[in-house]
Image (cartoon, rainbow, N blue to C red):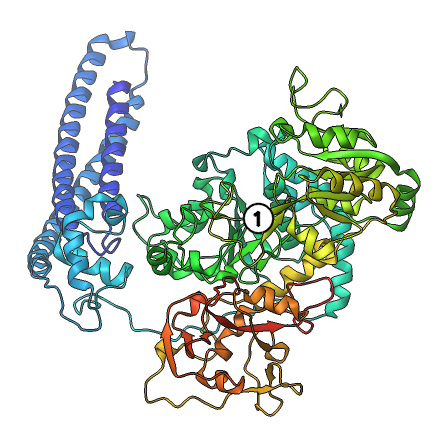
Amino acid sequence: RIFVLGIGFFTLCFLMTSLGGQFSAKRLGDSPFTIRTEVMGALESRGVLRRMSDMLEMLMKRMDILARLENSTDFHRGDEARFPLDRFQPAAGLMERIQAIAQNVSDIAIKVDQILRNSLLNGKLTEGRRDQCEVPRDPKYPDCAGKVEWMRARWTSDPCYAFFGVDGTECSFLVYLSEVEWFCPPLPWRNRTVAVPSPPPPPRAQAAFRRDLARLLELIGTGKESLSFMKKRIRHLAQQWLRAARRLEQKLAGRQRDQKHILIHIGFLTEESGDVFSPRVLKGGPLGEMVQWADILAALFVLGHSLRVTVSLKELQSHLGVPPGRGNCPLTSPLPFDLIYTDYHGLQQMKQHMGLSFKKYRCRVRVIDTFGTEPAYNHEEYATLRGYRTNWGYWNLQPAQFMTMFPHTPDNSFMGFVSEELNQTERQLIKANKVSSMAVVYGKEASIWKGKEKFLAILNKYMEIHGTVYYETQRPPEVPAFVKNHGLLPQHEFQQLLRKAKLFIGFGFPYEGPAPLEAIANGCVFLQARFNPPHSSLNHEFFRGKPTSREASLVSSQHPYAEDFIGKPHVWTVDYNNSEEFEAAIKTIMRTQVDPYLPYEYTCEGMLERIHAYIQHQDFCTTSSLPPSPKTKSPAMQSPPSPLALAPNATHLVWSPSAGRAPRAWPPVASLQVWVSEPQHTCTETCRRHGLVCEPTFFGFLNKEEVFLQLSIACDSTEYEMNHLYPAVAENVRECYLQKEPLLFSCAGSNTKYRRLCPCRDFRQGQVALCRDCL
């Protein structure tokens, strides 16, 4: 009996829950495409109500029979009955409740039936309207018809369309294409709330320099050797970062800085990209990229910005708000980040999963790009037509959105990294303990040593040679027996080795890593090979396929930055094929006294200064204040007078003091100088010859016919074309050329036919990325 009562009670609960689920699961207004679903759901709900009423009535009849049977049994038992008569009171009370519920359910069923009759009538009218949707012919939306046709054929190709309510009907296509995407005009029958003026956004939180890096270490996470390496580096340099932050804070003198919400997605560490780096961290693999990423994380955090760090595709999708599916639909909500720092792998992942939102938000992306991306490789159409297309280029970003490890080309932004700074006591200690006959070879992989026996034999005549080549059980055969190989060393032990050594010698590879700067900062002389001819994508396999020709910064040695920006006595670049020159260099280096040296731009303060300036001033999402490109100007438009004027010595142009109010530009236009290159010279070379830096931001000011006249250049004709060498003049035929596509303005590139117009600027001492007034 109790069992039957329990079954009845739980049946009642189950039926009520099912009924509630029917209504909650199909609530009107959940989706713009649920009209048909609502009608069917309502019919099902009416059936549930009827079945529930019938089952309750049946339950009451069975309980009534059970009660009569129980009374009869107890009467025959008489005095033998063991239970009091009032034990039937709860059952009677339960039956009364069930009767009341059944009556309520019956009333509800009648009301629902009335509602559903009205819903069916309205549903038929709306269904007819939905079936009668026609593709609008609006000249403001020329792609609408084509997009609807595409949706008809492929709307099932990605679940994200169903997520946004597409159900295969014509109206659902149009609603999606007008409200989720923007290819069709809004539908007049759609319920749209009247636009209410939104309140002004609250004031942005201000960035404050941080004094503790513990929270950053938590943000980076665990689970990969690469992450462990980065966290160890941040801990090791923590005090230097904090001291640098205090110095920069004093330099900025309380200047207001908006706090940015920044996503850092390290794409090359994701499993989807292969993550070949993490397993090799402890086996002599390349660490340069992880060194740079660790320093970027530390700099952004110390500057006081709000960070999110991801090294997995799943986390990236979650942070971006990617809808379920294969990445063809836009994000479900506005992008919550002001900036995204990623790499080429991350850029590809974002494009695959953000749909149309990638084009909308790509101006917020900053791409950490070790070797750089030149404009000719970045412009998709131009790269395809002119043979510059590679596996890594053609993104149509602003070239300054690519951020390099070294200042290869001014077309890109120089991000850099940091090397450890020494205090005065450490510098004196290093000088006292230097061993003038000790050399350390640059190269942790045994393959780098292969074929270098001749150089090593000459070096062994004068110096004790040390190596740090990784091996597991047996000594690598490529390393000669006279070399003292320490195996792969932890970073602090490697630093101690450099502090004793006199010479740090490179054998031509790896290119442009951080180790030579660390060696020079620890008082070593860096000896490297000169490449003749210079290496480039045209003649060397390593650079082939990379989106740079390296014409702007020739790879004339293993480490061009060390050769060009540091030089002797700290850096010696010689012809290794000339044994006499090589041997003479070793003898001279052993006699030369050098102090530890670190360029300011590779100190913690220098990197903080640079990133602060980029975040404050670089904005690729708003319309530029520079002059419009020729292709956007009406033929009837009169060009305003040139704001440039001849310098007093009449060799170049400068910003005219009488030009009136200077446009709001960064770098400031007062730093601009316009020089004309020699044939076969890049603008990078031309500016450097005058002690300046090429500044591609300024190309818009000199991409005008009158500039040729101001420089006394005769032009029989002037043409607008897409070419990364323009503006330029072909003097032998007196033809002048202006740039048609602003994305192709480039400091790189040269040709024997052209003399180029080059925008140059000054720069801060030790900080080539910033002009004197750029901070």
On screen, residue 350 versus residue 401, left or right, reads left
In the rendered image of this protein, does residue 82 appear above or below residue 425?
above
Q: Which residue is drawn at 27% across and 46% down?
A: 24
Measured from the top left, where is residue 330 in percent x and y? 33, 54
Asked whether, in this view, residue 455 is left or right of residue 222, the answer is: right
Is the N terminus in the top left, top right, bottom left or bottom right quadrant? top left
Q: In the picture, which quadrant includes the C terminus?
A: bottom right
The quarter of the picture where residue 14 lies is top left
Q: Residues within 10 Å of mark 1 (few under 14, many from 20)?
A: few
755, 8: nearer the viewer: 755
- Residue 385: % across, % down: 33, 58
**Residue 410 lies in what quarter of the image?**
bottom right
- Front position in the image: 506 or 258: 506
Three-letter code for the amino acid on which mark 1 is drawn:
Pro
- Point 76% across, 34% down: residue: 440
Q: Is residue 115 visible?
A: yes
Residue wearing tag 1: 533
Q: In this view, does 752 lie above or below 473?
A: below
Residue 273 in percent (x, y) is at: 45, 37
Q: How many marks?
A: 1
Q: Residue at x 14, y 68 (%)?
A: 136
Q: Is residue 107 visible?
A: no
| Whole-percent x, y for residue 83 in the image | 32, 15
Between 686 and 62, which is closer to the camera in this rendering?
686
Which element type, helix, strand or loop, lies under badge 1?
strand
